[in-house]
Image (spheres, rainbow, N blue to C red):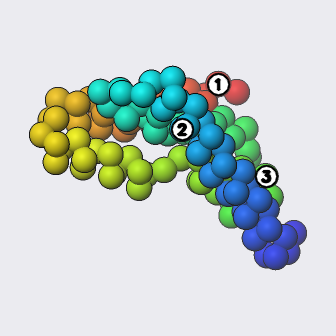
Amino acid sequence: MSQTDLNFLLAVGGGAGALCRYLLGLALMKKFPTPRIPIAMLIVNILGSFGLGLLNGNLDSKDLSNDALFVLLGFGFFGAFTTFSTFSVEAVQLVMDKKYQHALIYLSFSIFGSIIGFLLGYYLN
């Protein structure tokens, strides 16, 4: 597969992942309008980590940068679906608001939840 084809798959997957993150985030914020911690991005990041683990666990390729499915879903979709930058902003905002306990809960659940989600997905196959 050519680099141009891989770039196209990356763009399509990234666009779909970003759109899904946005729509799911809106739906979760509507359902939980005043959470103590940023529940929408917490759920999105754990789900995305689980999905990426599931994908990784089912691919045998050693060079994933040239695997069309991984470029589309791994780098593209899940790369855009999950968001470390929003997680960082929300964590810092909790600290700046002096909500230290909420910040610790959010940090812990985000980090460990994402890692556990990835591992569950990876070993599920």
Q: Name the residue under label 2.
A: 25
Marker count (numbered) = 3
Would you say 17 lies left or right of 102 here?
A: right
Residue 70, percent across and down? Answer: 72, 53
Q: What residue type is labelled 1?
A: Leu
Q: Which amino acid does label 3 sit on?
A: Leu
Q: What residue type is labelled 2?
A: Gly
Q: Which label lies toward us, 1 or 3? A: 3
Mark pair 3, 2: CA separation = 25 Å
Q: Mark 3 points at which residue?
A: 69
Residue 67 visible from this viewpoint: no
Circle nearer the N terminus (1, 2): 2
The residue that appears at 82% across and 76% down in the rendered structure is 4
User: What label does residue 86 carry, if any?
Assistant: none
The residue that appears at 66% across and 43% down in the rendered structure is 20
Mark pair 1, 3: CA separation = 19 Å
Q: Which label lies toward us, 3 or 2? A: 2
Mark pair 1, 2: CA separation = 26 Å
Q: State whether residue 102 is above or below residue 4.
A: above
Residue 73 visible from this viewpoint: yes
Nearest the camera: 71 or 42?
Answer: 42
